[in-house]
Amino acid sequence: MAPVIALVFVLAGIIIFALVNFLQVFWSIFDYFLGDRRNTNWLIKPLRSEYKDIIQNKFSFYQQLGFRQRKTFEKRLQKFIDQKNFEPKGELKEVTPEMKALIGASAIQVTFGLPTIYLEHFTDIYIYPEPYFSNITGHYHKGEANSTGILVLTWDNFVKGYLDPNDGRNLGLHEMAHALKIEDYTRNSEFSFLDSKLISGFTRETRLEAIRINDGEPSIFRAYAATNDHEFFAVVIENFFERPEEFKVSNLRLYQLTCQLLNQDPLDYRAYLV
């Protein structure tokens, strides 16, 4: 009788082991198709033609991508546009398809190496035609990423940012960088996606660079970057995309940290892990 009982336990163990392994494999397959990849290539509508024509002709970042990367960019852009509420403000009468396409494209540019990030916290995007007056600060602003979940941009300055792609000044990239940092510490499904060790190293490097700027030493970054850590982060992102070669030569360590944080390298589009 004892051998029979032992055999039953052995068979039961084998069955349980096989079942656990089956469930693990099943969950891995499920998660691959419907888990994190839900925000990349799966279950995402293709980009509408009115938006695609615009980025094909007016968005250089997209133009430099390979065929498969373009398809990923298009699907992510359509999802971003669908998720956001775009509102005209001030004297602006309507939000045009061009505004939605290019503003959305600037967000996907910054998050392209972070395929599950859509700046979920920022549900509303307000667009002014030109600098607007803030009753809170008592100053005119070109844009802001508000921690309440509102992203504000002035269309004239947004366009100027992309007219010269090599000057390291780009309102869209600047505000999307602020939004990225806010998103990282906002508790939602996208919470804490930036590596804390990389952020610490990044901050150490920017503070050293800020000291050099304040001491009057040459720097690729404009003096405004030294205002605080948040502004330096945004200015770094501007230069990362607009002047990557100069940035890399100027401060290799900071450039490498930025590549790791954003999971992309503007000097090698084959390295995009999307």
Image: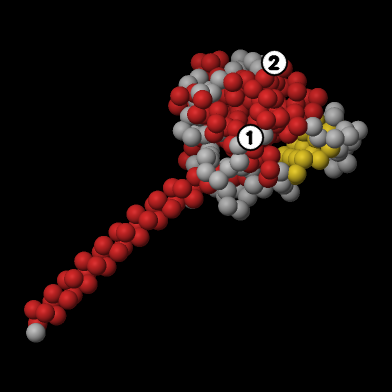
Compared with 244, 127 (above or below) is: below
Instruction: Judge left or right: residue 52 versus residue 245.
Output: right
Compared with 185, 103 (above or below) is: above
Q: Residues within 10 Å of mark 1 (few under 14, many from 20)?
A: many
> Mark 2 or 1, which is nearer the eye?
1
Report the front residue among 33 and 257.
33
Q: Quick check: can you spot residue 157?
A: yes
Task: Provide the residue designation for mark 1.
Answer: 47
Answer yes or no: do the residues labelled 2 and 1 have beta carbons within 8 Å?
no
Q: Quadrant of residue 233?
A: top right
Which is nearer the N-term, disc 2 or disc 1?
1
Q: Which mark is residue 209?
A: none
Q: Quadrant of residue 63?
A: top right
- Give percent across and percent down for residue 7: 13, 74
Q: Residue furthest bottom?
A: 1
Instruction: Judge left or right: residue 233 versus residue 90.
Output: left
Q: Residues within 10 Å of mark 2 (few under 14, many from 20)?
A: few
Q: Quadrant of residue 102?
A: top right
Task: Provide the residue designation for mark 2.
Answer: 164
Amino acid carrying mark 1 in the image: Leu
Mark 2 element type: loop
